[in-house]
Structures are given as C-alpha cells and as structure tokens.
Amino acid sequence: MALEAESREHLLQIQAGALGRKKGHKFEGELAQTINSLDFTNNLLTVDTTQGVYRGSPATLLLNFICSKFKSLGPIKNVSALSTGSIATAEKELKTNIIFNGKQITKTKSDLILLFENFEGGTITFGVSTKQCNTKSPTNAQLFFTTASKFCGHLRNHEFEVPHDAEIELKKFCGDKGFTPSDLGIKNRQVDPRRFFWEELEPSGKDFWERLFSSNQDQISNILFRKAYEEDPLEPTLILHKTRKIEDQTAQEYAIYDIDDLLFLSRRYRGFEKNLYQVNKGSYRDPRDIFHEAPRFGIIQMQRGGQKQHPTQLQFNLEAGYFYKI
C-alpha cells in the first residue's frame, strides 16, 4: 500500500501547501509537522504496548507505539506524516494528486496518515484517528454523527438487514420531521415534545436495535470506529486520544490503541445495556419521577445529537474517561 504522490518531498510539499487549517484539525496538523521534523530512529522504543495511557510528546509516543506493536516493520529509515485536515484545505492542484490505493482521498476516518519507509525502499502506511479533550476532566468524544436514515442505510451497505419499522423507531428517537410526538398527534407531554425517548419506542423496532447491538457489538463498533465513508481509501488502524487538558505540557497524557485491541477491550468492559438519566437543564426539564433509558455498548454511548445546528442527528460518543476504565 502506498500513496502515488508519496515521496517524502512531495508529502511535505502537500503539507506545506495547505492554505490553512480549521480549528478542529489543528492538533493533527501540528502533530504531522512534528513527525516530519523528527530524525527518526528505532533506538527510541520505550513504550509498553500493554498499557493505554502515556505521558510525553504525542509524536514520539505514537511512533514508538507503532514500532513496538508492529514488530514486522523491521528497521525503519524514515517516517512521513500527512494531516487529512490539510487535504480539505490544500491547493486544488495538489489535492487532486493525493491518491491512496488508486483512489483520491477526499474523506477518510483517518485524521493522520503515516508512511514508514524501510531501508529496502518499501513503505507501510498507517491511518490514525485522533481525538482530543481540552478540559480539565475528560469529556465524551464524538465517534460517529449522522441521521437515522443514513445510519440505517450505512448498516445495509455493510450487509445488515434493517427492517423498515426499526428505521421508523430510530427516526422517532432522533425527532426527525414527521416523526415527533406533535407530528403524530400526541399532546400534553410531561417531557420533551420534540422527540421520543428510547423507552417510548415501539417494541417491534426497539427490540431489533437492542438485539443488533447485543449480538453484533464488535461489528457495529468497528463500523463506528472505521467505516464512516463508503469510499474511504484508508481506514484507521490506530486511535490517539488526548485525554484532558493538563497545564504542564511535559505531563500531558495521550491514550493510544490499536483499534482491533480497543474493540476487544470495549466488549470485555461492557455489553449492551441501558443507563437511566434525567434531563435537568434546557427548556424541557423532566419531572422528578421520570427517567429515560440511554443505550450503550462497551465504551460507546448512543444519543440524539440535540445540537442547535443539527438537533435531530444520531450521535455515537466514546464514554468520558474510557481509557482509565478499560
């Protein structure tokens, strides 16, 4: 596997040719620049790959983790990095030349692309998904964000049969237009009238989702971690997660996992279950005696987005602080 515009010089040209970075891509952009400035050597392997959370430079930690985890790499001559955040903002003539496995990279679940060059002239490529938390305590990290209909279609594209009534119930859970309590003639609700909660869904559809998440936890989790885009030419192998904001940069923490290992740890941590919660803020606060069910499996939590811009989106998050728990 190799980039067709993949000489180190051209890779750095692409990185430098970005017109700018969106705020959300700053972390991986700076990470790529640091990796490209390193004088790489295999003599720096200090990471114990049986652990998940490390302190130090994220660039060095990530490279050491990969070389320690994937022994088959052998002696490495050089490593180059490309932030896909800069793909979105690169000059057009450069952007059209970024090809992987014969496909132009326009969207990918990998936020960072690493090319390991060995002494025989070969290259081995890794995709890295990055997450970051900039508050003092870990928060939920968004993993997958879409609509109910698109999620159902996405599962069908990955050979899961999703019944029509199950899709309808998911639309009700998200509060899609035409599927809200008000749209369906339900009045005088004590709770949020803009959507249905999980416990309110019809068993015919709700039971399907609970069986699916229970029986296919690894497969569904893998889709959420890796398969957001149908034409993704480079699905991520690894995840790098800045755990929280630490004022002392030398003590900054990063969780690093091989995603295959993380899927196993997630399933071992928890199967499918439903947590109870209340809405205690906003315009539609719950009465004291009403609780709602929140579906979750492993380290993944499922909810209605509720954001001002995209209130009816379906959102899957990583549990806050999962790296301390698994």
Image: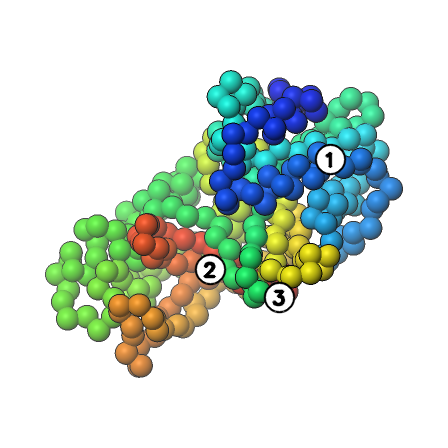
Q: Do the residues labelled 3 and 1 touch (CB within 8 Å)?
A: no
Name the spot of residue 196 as percent of width and height, x first: 27, 62
Residue drawn 34% across the image and 71% down it: 281
Q: Which amino acid does label 3 sit on?
A: Lys
Give the class, few, some or many, for how many residues have Cα within 10 Å of label 2's Cα (few <14, many ≥20).
many
Name the spot of residue 244 as percent of width and height, x first: 60, 60
Disc 3 secondary structure class: helix
Residue drawn 59% across the image and 45% down it: 27
Q: Mark 1 points at which residue?
A: 37
Left or right: where 263 falls relative to 179: right
Give the class, few, some or many, for how many residues have Cα within 10 Å of label 1's Cα (few <14, many ≥20).
few
Name the spot of residue 261 as percent of width and height, x first: 65, 51
Disc 2 secondary structure class: strand
Q: Which amino acid does label 2 sit on?
A: Gln
Hey, which residue is sitting farthest bottom in the picture? 289
Residue drawn 66% across the image and 47% down it: 258
Q: Mark 3 points at which residue?
A: 325
Q: Distance between the Cα atoms at labels 1 and 2?
A: 38 Å
Disc 1 secondary structure class: helix
Give the class, few, some or many, for how many residues have Cα within 10 Å of label 3's Cα (few <14, many ≥20).
few
Q: Nearer the viewer, mark 3 or mark 1?
A: 1
Q: Which mark is residue 26?
A: none
Decide if residue 13 is in sight here: yes
User: Vertical placement of 177 versus 104: above or below?
Assistant: below
Q: Name the residue under label 2.
A: 301
